[in-house]
Image (cartoon, rainbow, N blue to C red):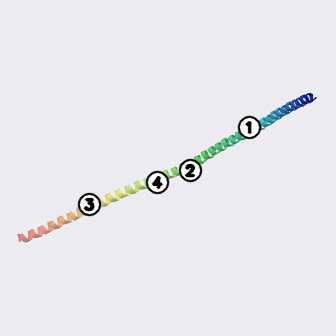
Amino acid sequence: MTSVANDLTAMRASRFKEQESKRHSFEIKKLKAENNSTFQKEVKFNDNLISNMRRDYERKISQLDTELERKLNEVRNGNKGKIRTENERLISEVTDLKSAHTDQVTEIKVSHRNEIENLSESHRNTLENAKTKFLQEKQKWEI
């Protein structure tokens, strides 16, 4: 009987071992499936998160580009007005300088003309005085 009992015990142990092995395999498959499902959910969540972040980043880049373009146009328009004002001021300054130059040239011409007239008058007076003195000296010697 011991051999039958040993055989029965060995069979029971073998069946128990098989059941435990099947249960263990089932639990491993179940855990693998749960972990795979959790992993797939995390991957999908993170892909969506990355997609949203990328979309937000692209939107922010687009907004910044638009804002910078707007500011650049404002600066350009402001500079156009300043350039226009400065060009008008430059034209006015050049016109004033030309007018002042013309006035100075006219003034110098008048001054030179007056100086020439004064020198000519002085020269005539000197010649007349010399002539008068010469005639007076000549009369002294003729007497």
Q: Which comes sooner in the sequence, label 2 or label 1?
A: 1
Q: Is residue 79 left or right of residue 43?
A: left
Residue type of the residue flagged with mark 3: Ile
Tag 4 residue? 92
Residues 111 and 95: in front is 95
Q: Is residue 31 left or right of residue 8?
A: left
Q: Which quarter of the rendered picture does the N terminus lie within? A: top right
Tag 2 residue? 78
Residues 61 and 136: in front is 61
Q: Nearer the viewer, mark 1 or mark 4?
A: 1
Residue type of the residue flagged with mark 2: Gly
Q: In what element is the residue under mark 1?
A: helix
For the residues labelled 2 and 4, the Cα–Cα distance comes to 21 Å
Residue type of the residue flagged with mark 1: Val
Q: Quadrant of residue 14?
A: top right
For the residues labelled 3 and 4, the Cα–Cα distance comes to 36 Å
Q: Which mark is residue 107?
A: none
Q: Which comes sooner in the sequence, label 3 or label 2?
A: 2
For the residues labelled 3 and 1, the Cα–Cα distance comes to 105 Å
Residue 83 position (above or below residue 44): below
Label 1 neighbourhood size at 10 Å, few (<14), some (14-19), many (20+)? few
